[in-house]
Amino acid sequence: MSDAPQGDSQQRSARLLLSALVALGLLARLTLAFAMGDGQAGRMPESAEYLAIARSVAEGGGFVLPAASTSGPADGSGRAEAARHMPGYPLILAAAEAGFDAGDRAVLVFQSLCGAATLVVVTWMAARLAGLWAAVAAAALLTFAPYQVYLSAQIAPVVPVGLAFAAVTAAGLGFLDAVSDGGRRGWLWAATAGLALAVAAYLEAWAAGLVLPAGLAALLSRRRKRLLAGWALATAILVAALAPWLVRNAVRVGAPVLTTDVGWRLYEGTGGDAAAEVLVPPEGVDEAGRCMFYLRRAAGRIAEAPASWLGRAAHRVARLWTPGAMTEAGEGLLHPAAGYTGLVPTAALALAGLAVYRRRAVALWLIVGAVYVTLVHGVLPGPATDRLAVMPSLAALGGVGIVTLLGRGNRAISDSGLPNPG
């Protein structure tokens, strides 16, 4: 009987720590958001393009990137690009500009709230898997992670994408539990995952491809029939949500694509920028044709020197997961040591969680996002900050890992205080 009061006391302590960590995480992000001076929130390479699209939306020009603001190769046509970026983040910027006197500041506050919401989702996942102390450990890994805090105060969609990815992972966990327990709410979790993935895709086009490794994992599972049914529902919702943008691009640029930036990025990843700067599409080629032009040239260069392309792919993957500076020098980001304090403990504990957690399907689901982002960077050049979108899931697995390791021989708290769906 003496164990019950002790367990209640431990749970109260864990809940208090969780509340404090989430509150401190929000406070740290808001403090930095309000401390940013004029122009300091636009230091990311893509910030200027997002702001230019947002201004076009606010002025009634639609989701187009003016030619003067394009950072890619110029073809001399002077045409605006209608599908260079997904519309989600520019819409957030435009709405903040229209609704608040200090639009940039409003966006930073919104992103701070997204960062705090990500903490809540991560603690929910970790608590559901291994108890409240796992949630405390997971929250501790993210609360003051330097880049997670800093990028909340930058004009870039990194933090909202991270929240959307965390929501996809959490919904996937709920679906796996429903399938395992034979519950009937699996369709609700699958639908939620599809909606969350659609939100992520409207912020970053590459997020939509997460359905591919998820579908492969479902196909290889012993419960493939129910998992594939949930995957099909989530995929159908994703496609339905993206359909308006695809139709718009079919009309506007002549092809039902998410973005016309893929061709240039793939070509950029096959050789040096100097060669790419010289090669421009023929005069009169439209935006979709320009994308196909670079796709064909990229395919040709890969076929000519596959070993060289594989070497560049390995370099991009290494840069993605190197615990140092996440961007090139001179872009005003944090000291290289900041990458070590965020990545190293989270990755180490996540690997421990993957090794010791008995529910393999769940543990593997928590790393699907990291595997997918790694594959994307192996093919397409992109900022190393993309890894931050999947770090919340790794933090949840890391919390599970440390509690499982420390809980050997002792009973870890299993009552998360959360409802068990399904």
Image (tube, rainbow, N blue to C red):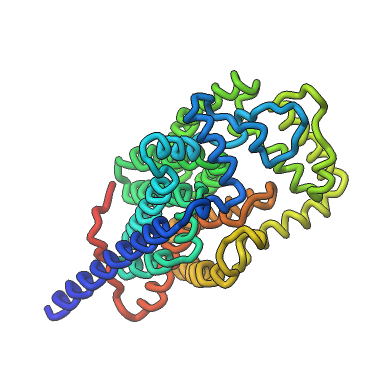
The residue shown at (55%, 26%) is: 246
Quarter of the picture containing the N terminus is bottom left
Q: Is residue 295 left or right of residue 366?
A: right
The residue shown at (58%, 52%) is: 44
User: Is the residue 396 above or below the residue 177 in the image?
Assistant: below
The residue shown at (60%, 31%) is: 83
In terms of depth relative to the viewer, which is nearer, 405 or 256?
Answer: 256
- Residue 84 image-quadrant placement: top right
Q: Is residue 89 left or right of residue 404?
A: right
User: Is the residue 286 above or below the residue 99 in the image?
Assistant: above
Q: Is residue 229 visible?
A: no
Residue 293 % position (x, y): 78, 31
In terms of depth relative to the viewer, which is nearer, 55 or 192?
Answer: 55
In terms of depth relative to the viewer, which is nearer, 194 or 129?
Answer: 194
User: Is the residue 24 above or below the residue 236 in the image?
Assistant: below
Residue 174 % position (x, y): 35, 49
Residue 78 % position (x, y): 71, 28
Q: Residue furthest left?
A: 1
Q: Residue furthest top?
A: 251
Residue 361 % position (x, y): 46, 56
The residue shown at (43%, 70%) is: 401
Q: Is residue 82 visible?
A: yes
Q: How many marks?
A: 0
Q: Is residue 359 left or right of residue 45?
A: left
In terms of depth relative to the viewer, which is nearer, 189 or 305?
Answer: 305
User: Is the residue 329 above or below the residue 185 in the image?
Assistant: below
